[in-house]
Image (cartoon, helix red, strand yellow):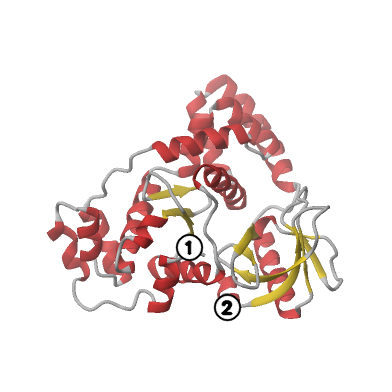
């Protein structure tokens, strides 16, 4: 998100309430990659809100009052003018590239009603699922990806998101894939090293950060997962797993059942990721000016000569030492 770059280091204090009966407490608020991070003053993350889902409850008034969604009980009060302006500009930018609230369902219902009838008569179920995955707007995919991430987090432990580590993840994402930086999320445990979710989200196993000496290894795993994602659309895989009935409900309501998300989360955590050919990885390492040898050794790539020459000499700095240390300790705060 281009609009986020000028606010990547913006922080402010606020008052956060977890529920209607909870006491308000002082928190540190910062902007992450597609999220608003809410942490204690000691920078221990309490929660993170998806920027596309944030709702302002008192437009035009200060302090600004926000919620993470239309039906959410959490509340965040912010009086810092710069942070309020940043959140409002990002919400406006997001709003421009997606249907306005309510229009997604109206658009889907109106424009695809005839298509649904035709699909029931002439298409196979698989064709309808593929069509749904292809027409779902980016904002819809991003919201579903966030919901799926939460379900995975319930199985593995919540996403690790201290303020310092989240900023480092944002910088790593933009450095490795500057044209379309994904949102990177770190989980404390997961069977696969990486997972690709709808909405351009890539999940990293914390062991990738904790057990390797250089960020080039992690960058290689991100590039490899990007290749897998491009070969097998995460949204299509989710809908194929959810089935035709859940897909039809998504078309008519704009929502995917939680049971379908839970089942797919289990499927993703139990899958085995296959290797990526060195010939596919080589141009990506080269384009990003990242040394390939550390990843090739760590991942056990048999054809080491196939990718090592891509950038085996001096490479551009991937991350600062401070950022790398923050990432290695992202789940330990």
Q: How many C-alpha atoms fall within 10 Å of the one at disc 2: few (<14), some, or many (≥20)?
A: few
The spot of residue 325 in percent (x, y) is 41, 72
Specify the quadrant that holds the N terminus.
bottom right
Q: Residue at x 62, y 36 (%)?
A: 258
- Left/right of residue 323 with respect to residue 8 in the rendered view: left
Near-viewer residue (243 or 122): 243
Of tags 1 and 2, which is closer to the observer?
1
The spot of residue 92 in percent (x, y) is 70, 66
Residue 178 seen in the figure: no
Q: Residue at x 21, y 55 (%)?
A: 279
- Left/right of residue 209 with respect to residue 74 in the rendered view: left
The spot of residue 153 in percent (x, y) is 54, 47
Q: Which residue is mark 1?
A: 332
Residue 104 drawn above or below residue 95: above
Residue 195 drawn above or below residue 255: below
Q: How many C-alpha atoms fall within 10 Å of the one at disc 1: few (<14), some, or many (≥20)?
A: few
- Left/right of residue 294 with respect to residue 137 in the rendered view: left
Q: Secondary structure at mark 1?
A: loop
Residue 236 drawn above or below residue 98: above
Does label 1 or label 2 sit earlier along the sequence?
A: 2
Which numbered marker is on residue 119?
none
The spot of residue 275 in percent (x, y) is 26, 47
Q: Secondary structure at mark 2?
A: loop
Residue 78 occupies which quadrant of the picture? bottom right
From mark 1 to mark 2, how far is it between C-alphas?
22 Å
Picture mark count: 2
Residue 102 seen in the figure: yes
Task: Mark 1 and mark 2 in contact? Answer it, CB < 8 Å.
Answer: no
Q: Residue at x 39, y 42 (%)?
A: 232
Q: Which residue is mark 2?
A: 9
Near-viewer residue (192 or 158): 158
């Amino acid at each position: 998100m281009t609009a986020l770059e000028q606010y990547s280091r913006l922080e402010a204090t606020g008052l956060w309430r977890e529920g209607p009966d909870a006491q308000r407490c002082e928190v540190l608020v910062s902007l992450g990659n597609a999220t608003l991070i809410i942490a204690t003053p000691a920078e221990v993350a309490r929660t993170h809100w998806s920027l596309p889902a944030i709702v302002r409850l008192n437009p035009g008034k200060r302090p600004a009052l926000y919620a993470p969604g239309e039906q959410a009980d959490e509340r965040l009060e912010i009086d810092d003018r710069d942070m309020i302006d940043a959140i409002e500009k990002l919400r406006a930018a997001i709003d421009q590239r997606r249907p306005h609230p309510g229009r997604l369902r109206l658009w889907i219902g109106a424009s695809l009603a005839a298509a649904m009838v035709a699909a029931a008569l002439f298409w196979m179920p698989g064709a309808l699922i593929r069509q749904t995955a292809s027409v779902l707007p980016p904002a819809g995919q991003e919201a579903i990806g966030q919901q799926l991430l939460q379900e995975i987090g319930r199985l593995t432990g919540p996403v690790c998101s201290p303020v310092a580590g989240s900023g480092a993840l944002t910088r790593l994402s933009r450095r490795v894939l500057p044209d379309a930086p994904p949102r990177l999320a770190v989980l404390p445990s997961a069977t696969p090293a990486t997972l690709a979710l709808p909405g351009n989200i890539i999940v990293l196993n914390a062991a990738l950060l904790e057990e390797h000496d250089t960020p080039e290894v992690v960058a290689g795993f991100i590039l490899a997962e990007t290749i897998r994602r491009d070969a097998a659309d995460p949204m299509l895989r989710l809908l194929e797993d959810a089935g035709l009935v859940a897909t039809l409900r998504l078309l008519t309501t704009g929502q995917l059942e939680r049971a379908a998300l839970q089942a797919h989360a289990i499927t993703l955590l139990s899958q085995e990721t296959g290797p990526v050919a060195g010939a596919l990885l080589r141009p990506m390492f080269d384009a990003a000016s990242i040394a390939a040898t550390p990843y090739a050794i760590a991942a056990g790539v048999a054809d080491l000569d196939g990718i090592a020459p891509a950038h085996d000499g001096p490479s551009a700095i991937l991350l600062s030492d401070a950022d790398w240390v923050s990432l290695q300790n992202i789940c330990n705060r």
